[in-house]
Amino acid sequence: MPAPDRSAAVPVTDLRLRHATSWSHATHHPFLAAVRDGTIPEAAFETWLVQDYRFVQDLLVFQARLLARAPRPAQAVLARGAVALVDELAWFEEQAVARRLDLDVPPMPATAAYAVLLGRLDDADVTVALTALWALERVYLDAWSFAAPGAPAYREFVAHWTTPQFAAYVDALEQAADDAVGAALGGSDLDAVFAEVVDAESDFWAMALRDMTWTEQAL
């Protein structure tokens, strides 16, 4: 049996080019523009913030399971990321105290749908799961970079999600995903999962704005 041809492996970042329209929508969403210019209602932002806390809880579970089955070279970056998510949850809890937010609320539909997607990725090929993790973190970084520096009321949040440390982590995830793709024995359809993640991110931005008159022309 001939050895698998790995020369055709392409960088996962090429997925952004193949899905340029949906990527642009997810990273230049009206929610982000409104955070940047200060026109987003505070209630809408806080609704999103609480749901993002719930998402990070789900992401930590997914990442911990991925760490256990990931290729050995990827485990270090996944472990660092898992520790960072624990710290991120603590940071959310501090923000909730300061803003008097209740974090114990049910997930909204977009949050619940994202949790289902992460659950399915638990059973996916490790290459697919790593690529999905890189995609969701990269879209998050690019999105908040678009919103930078943010209106004064939200500047602390934008700065928190655009640090050089977070950018370096996303770059390390990209390398881990590229390595996994290059070593894969079979051709996984990464386009499908990438598209799902990007659409899930767009839905997540939009969920706090739905049913609010502010969004009638923005969305």
Image (cartoon, rainbow, N blue to C red):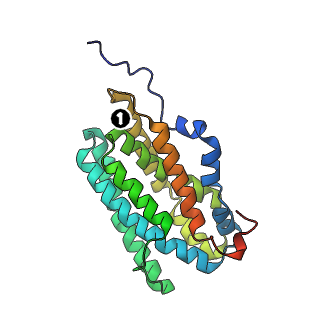
In percent of width and height, residue 24 lies at 64, 49
In the image, is 32 to the left or to the right of 131? right
Q: What x and y, as percent, mark residue 206?
A: 60, 64
**Image quadrant where residue 209 sits:** bottom right
Q: Position of residue 72 (x, y in %)?
A: 25, 40
Q: Give the quarter of the image for residue 177.
A: top left
The C terminus - image quarter: bottom right
> Taking 133 as reference, is 16 above or below it?
above
Of residues 209 and 133, the one nearer the viewer is 209
Q: Which quarter of the rendering shows the N terminus?
A: top left
Query: To which residue does mark 1 refer?
Result: 180
Residue 98, placed above or below residue 11: below
Front-most of residues 148 and 67? 67
The residue under the point 47% across, 83% down is 101
Disc 1 residue crowd, few under 14, some 14–19, many 20+, Cα 10 Å:
many
Residue 172 seen in render: no
Residue 102 shows in the view: yes
Single out the residue that lies furthest toward the right. Answer: 217
